[in-house]
Image (tube, rainbow, N blue to C red):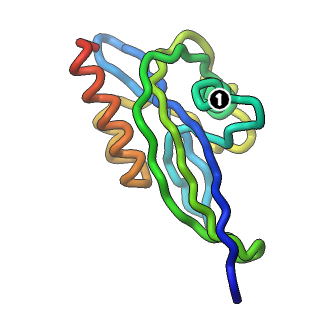
Amino acid sequence: MRYRTARQVSSGGVILRQQRGRFQVCLIARRREGALVWGLPKGHVEPGEDPPATALREVREETGLVGELTAPLGSITYRFAVQDERVRYVKRVHFFLLRYREGDTAHHDDEVEQARWLPLDKALTLLSYENERKVLRNAMRHLNEVGG
């Protein structure tokens, strides 16, 4: 069975707030094959939309939170296959650092099972994928460089 290759471009955000002098990040959980998978909010760049706008939109939709862009965090690339479609996808996800402005995690959309604020160290251990842990570590480095 031959698979065709297709490319996807997505964008996401690392949204942070300070609580009692410590930074927290909002992670989302989805169900995959019965298990909770924790990740950063992200989604497809829509036609006519640029990656920063997508990051703001996806964070708002998936977490219920409104953020302000503060810095780009780079991108990750990974591959996956969808057997029903007989397609191998090469996906690039651009990430941006966002400062929390307003909103409530109770207002996340139905694609997400949970949206939760966590201390950065706890979030690093909870994230399901190493490439997203690297993105969060990059955000932490950025905070250290600019003094939080």
In the rendered structure, the answer to whether residue 48 lies left or right of residue 122 reads: right
Q: Farthest residue toward the bottom?
A: 1
Which quadrant of the view contains residue 109? top right
Q: Which residue is mark 1?
A: 50
Q: Amino acid at mark 1?
A: Asp
Label 1 sits on a secondary structure element that is loop
Question: How many labels, in total?
Answer: 1
Q: In this view of the protein, can residue 44 be seen by the observer? A: yes
Given residues 76 and 24, the one toward you in this image is: 76
Q: Residue at x 54, y 10 (%)?
A: 101
Can you say whether 94 is above or below 99 in the image? below
Can you say whether 87 is above or below 12 in the image? below
Q: Residue at x 77, y 72 (%)?
A: 85
Query: Whole-percent x and y of residue 7?
Result: 64, 57
Quadrant showing the N terminus: bottom right
Quadrant showing the C terminus: top left
Query: Whole-percent x and y of residue 146?
Result: 26, 14
Please rate how many residues cluster around mark 1, counting C-alpha atoms within 10 Å: few if below 14, some from 14 to 19, many from 20. few
In the rendered structure, the answer to whether residue 5 lies left or right of residue 37 reads: right
Q: Residue at x 71, y 44 (%)?
A: 111
Q: In this view of the protein, can residue 106 be seen by the observer? A: no
Can you say whether 91 is above or below 120 in the image? below
Which quadrant of the view contains residue 139? top left
Q: Residue at x 76, y 75 (%)?
A: 84
Query: Whole-percent x and y of residue 67?
Result: 55, 17
Query: Whole-percent x and y of residue 11?
Result: 58, 37
